[in-house]
Image (cartoon, rainbow, N blue to C red):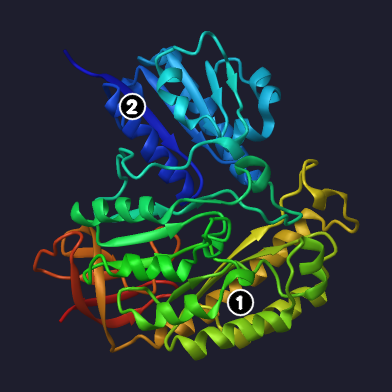
Amino acid sequence: MSKKQVYLESLGCARNTVDSEIMLGRLKNAGWSATKDPALAETIVINTCSFIEPAVNESIDTILELAGYKRSGACKRLIVVGCLPERYREKIAKELPEIDVFLGTGAFDQVVEAVEGRLNRKKCLFPDPNFTNLLDSVETRLQSHPHMAYLKIAEGCSRRCTYCIIPNLRGKLRSRPMDTILTEARRDVSSGVKELVLVAQDTTAYGNDLTPSQTIGRLLSELSALSEDIWIRVMYGHPESIDDEFLKTASGLSNICPYFDIPIQHVSSRILKRMGRNYTEQDLYHLFDRIRDIVPGAVLRTTIITGFPGETENDVEQLTKFMDTVKFDHLGVFIYSDSEDLPSHKLDRHVPGKTAKNRHDRIMSHQQAISSENNRKHLNRIYTILVDEEIEKDVFAGRTIFQAPEVDGITYIHSRVPLKTGSFIKAGINDTLEYDLIGEPV
């Protein structure tokens, strides 16, 4: 007898990816088979994002598109989970009658019951995310990548940035016990994973809420000891929780990527205060100088919000001067996304959308020149590359230690000799693009 088929569409960030992998694992244990073709699925699950307006729009567009399979495909049940229903609750349920069940961020553990129609006709489940169970070390996951795994080390965020809805959607910071993280990591490494990417809403604050407290530096030391033949990367750090222990650990252990993803959001001290970020421009200069002093060759990644209420042209000029000084290896820019459920909505001097878009484009153009200049420094150098995939005949895509999966540029490797996916190779860089590198095996 063939298994029942389910299709899951995962939207949003890497943290959502982990949730989706766990839901698929639970469904597999319950006798369901994951299909990549929604037309064949008896049930369709959509794991949504609602962090900013474009993410909300993408979630709704995806829901409406996949709802068509209830008419044209095998689909009998459509489930929407995650941040979108958690944020809009019964309001969105009324506007999307084609959805059978809405599960909030605290109801992921009921996905099997929802898919199988065993919720006693309950259409909306929104338990408080603060009281949901954290990941178990023995949780079955269907990994999205064969040789790279996202390792979620905490859930929620206890900060109160005025532009951010995440604490309302995910609850306060709740760190996983270190032993459960290490057990999961051991299983990943034994299955052939070559890169562990640590994620959370506030990754570098890991362990502050535990009793006794733990630190991200201690966790990295324990993970590093699992194997010399893996990379360990930290994403989603916070300027206020980067301490010297973390930096010295990253500097002293060869398998910890010297890669620092630290979203700063802005550099204008006035705008940062309005954002609820408790640091200044000078604090940021000091932070990045300290990182480079302690970790030679450190790679810096950040994200910026432009168009925040009260932002002026002088603030943007201050930001670009900061970029010229720090010279981030990778930088992303978001346009401020307003909503009535955000504290920042009540601030004065909102920036017109057209002005914010122009500023976004100027900042990105400015960073493109910086990234292109940074990349040229890699010419004629030899790096270790993790091979991700073959993209066409004799051309492979891979990443250096300073290129994170899915968010940064890649390294194109030209090789007539087949390269094994998930292997480390040495490659010489012979050409560069704005964000990508080009090389060949040596």
Residue position for label 1? 366
Question: Distance between the Cα atoms at labels 2 and 1?
Answer: 46 Å
The picture quadrant where one finds residue 226 is: bottom left
The residue pinned by badge 2 equals: 27
Residue 359 % position (x, y)? 71, 66
Query: The N terminus lies in which quarter of the figure?
Result: top left
Callout 2 secondary element: helix
Q: Residue furthest front?
A: 212
Which quadrant holds the C terminus?
bottom left
* x 40%, y 83%: residue: 251
The outermost residue toward the top is 120
| 10 Å crowding of disc 1: few (<14), some (14-19), many (20+) | some
Q: Are marks 2 and 1 in contact (CB under 8 Å)?
A: no
87, 372: nearer the viewer: 87
Helix, strand or loop at mark 1:
helix
Q: In the figure, 56 relative to 401: above or below?
A: above
User: What residue is shown at x 14% (from left), y 61% (from top)?
Assistant: 420
